[in-house]
């Protein structure tokens, strides 16, 4: 019976993918627990596996006595001499026992419970480690059941969970349908590992590109960035270091055959593939596709303004503004999309004059920045918004002109004028002007003296 039992355990281990060493550890733990339940100790006991006949034995060290009182530690001399004829009283001998014969009903039940528990734990650990290694990878399964909050996918060894937030609004699956997803994360819990799946994550789209496009899989075409609003639109920026490779064309394929297979998997979600560029203006113009930018202007605050024709505005913004949002996320900076009319209105507005001057006016290379006056950041910002970008610009402003700038009151204007008068040296310029005026005056008087009244200079 021991042999049949042990073989059955090995068969269970094979079916569940548990290593031979692990199943032997489980059996050893179960035998020791059962022995302790039977005799109250395991100090003098070891479990031995006989791999030749696939059996398990318990070996205990016992003292030879006439009348044993503690069966766990003593053995009668009559029983001992059946296997060791030369044994004497007081000797310690090793006694082999068949656990299935020596264990009582309670001890056997203990062994059974330990084995079942340990096998379940080993199975959970194997599943956890197996799927933990697959995090971020594509996996296939079949829809087993679904609730309002999640879909449960049969993955073979375990059940995957596809939460509602990781699903696309366009997707509708029925029980038994084949589902492709990425393993988002694997978590341990009391009931076993939880395999969380996703079809909404950007990594899912990236894996689909790697699966359908050989150049992406081989690294010839590199995916620089992916942004997505599941069920609405996905934007992918790609690049290639090889001049002979059209990165966008490689992803789209001839007549769009490659990208269409990905679109079908995403239930007809729109996908824009654009060429990545480190130039901000070029990248912004590409990112608002399918709209076409007529002009792109960089702003001082790190964003850009993309000007489109009036009939392209709705396309550039997208339904609910999704195209503009995704374009900004793809680029990593804010893109303000305006029509030609809106841009002209923006240029003529009072609040944009400072920005326009700042963008298009070429500054003198010798202009002194306002920071050198020691003004605080807020005051400098107010001055720049009012069209004052350098100390030279500030010197030309009068007190009345300063207080006309939004945010600058009389107190601030007075303080600015005081700082300017302390830092900027006007005396040399005034003296130079006086000297020039004096020289001009003297030469005029000399001419008058040399010319007699009533006579014209010949």
Image: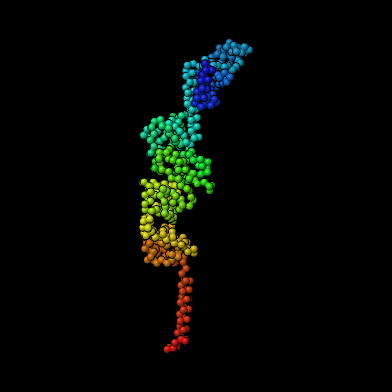
Q: Position of residue 80 (x, y in %)?
A: 59, 13
Which residue is at 60% across, 15% downward? 90
Q: Determine whether 383 is above or below 193 in the image.
A: below
Q: Position of residue 373 (x, y in %)?
A: 46, 62
Q: Is residue 314 visible?
A: yes
Q: Residue reaching furthest right?
A: 86
Q: Is residue 372 left or right of residue 49?
A: left
Q: Quadrant of residue 406?
A: bottom left
Q: Quadrant of residue 408?
A: bottom left
Q: Determine whether 113 is above or below 245 in the image.
A: above
Q: Residue reaching furthest front?
A: 255
Which residue is at 44% across, 51% downward? 285
Between 225 and 370, which is closer to the camera in this rendering?
Answer: 225
Q: Position of residue 24 (x, y in %)?
A: 54, 24
Between 78 and 230, which is closer to the camera in this rendering?
Answer: 230
Which residue is at 43% across, 45% downward? 272
Between 158 and 204, which is closer to the camera in this rendering?
Answer: 204
Q: Position of residue 239 (x, y in %)?
A: 50, 46
């Amino acid at each position: 019976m021991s042999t049949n039992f042990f073989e059955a355990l090995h068969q269970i281990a094979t079916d569940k993918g548990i290593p031979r060493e692990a199943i032997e550890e489980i059996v050893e733990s179960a035998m020791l627990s059962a022995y302790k339940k039977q005799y109250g100790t395991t100090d003098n006991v070891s479990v031995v596996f006989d791999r030749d006949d696939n059996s398990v034995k318990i070996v205990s060290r016992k003292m030879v006595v006439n009348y044993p009182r503690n069966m766990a530690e003593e053995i009668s001399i009559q029983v001992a001499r059946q296997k060791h004829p030369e044994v004497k009283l007081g000797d310690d001998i090793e006694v082999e026992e068949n656990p299935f014969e020596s264990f009582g009903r309670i001890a056997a039940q203990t062994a059974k419970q330990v084995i079942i528990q340990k096998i379940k734990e080993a199975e959970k650990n194997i599943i956890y480690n197996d799927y933990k290694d697959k995090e971020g990878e594509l996996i296939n399964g079949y829809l087993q059941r679904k609730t309002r909050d999640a879909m449960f996918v049969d993955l073979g060894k375990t059940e995957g969970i596809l939460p509602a937030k990781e699903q696309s609004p366009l997707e509708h699956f029925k029980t038994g349908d084949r589902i492709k997803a990425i393993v988002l994360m694997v978590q341990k819990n009391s009931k076993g590992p939880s395999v969380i799946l996703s079809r909404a994550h950007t990594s899912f789209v990236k894996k689909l590109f790697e699966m359908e496009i050989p150049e992406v899989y081989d690294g010839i075409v590199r995916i620089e960035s992916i942004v997505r609003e599941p069920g609405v639109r996905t934007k992918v920026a790609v690049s290639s270091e090889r001049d002979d490779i059209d990165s966008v064309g490689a992803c789209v394929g001839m007549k769009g055959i490659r990208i269409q297979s990905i679109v079908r998997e995403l239930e007809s979600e729109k996908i824009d593939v654009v060429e990545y560029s480190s130039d901000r203006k070029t990248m912004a113009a590409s990112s608002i596709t399918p709209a076409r930018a007529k002009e792109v202007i960089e702003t001082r605050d790190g964003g850009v303004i993309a000007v489109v024709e009036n009939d392209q505005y709705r396309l550039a913004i997208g339904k609910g503004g999704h195209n503009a949002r995704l374009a900004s996320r793809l680029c990593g900076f804010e893109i303000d999309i305006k029509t030609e009319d809106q841009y002209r209105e923006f240029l003529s507005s009072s609040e944009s004059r400072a920005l326009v001057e700042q963008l298009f006016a070429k500054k003198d290379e010798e202009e002194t920045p306002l920071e050198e006056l020691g003004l605080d950041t807020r005051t400098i910002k107010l001055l720049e918004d009012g069209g004052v970008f350098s100390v030279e610009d500030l010197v030309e402003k009068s007190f009345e002109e300063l207080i006309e700038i939004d945010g600058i009151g009389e107190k601030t204007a007075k303080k600015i004028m005081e700082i300017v008068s302390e830092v900027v040296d006007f005396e040399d310029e005034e003296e130079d002007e006086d000297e020039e005026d004096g020289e001009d005056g003297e030469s005029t008087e000399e001419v008058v003296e040399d010319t007699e009244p009533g006579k014209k200079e010949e």
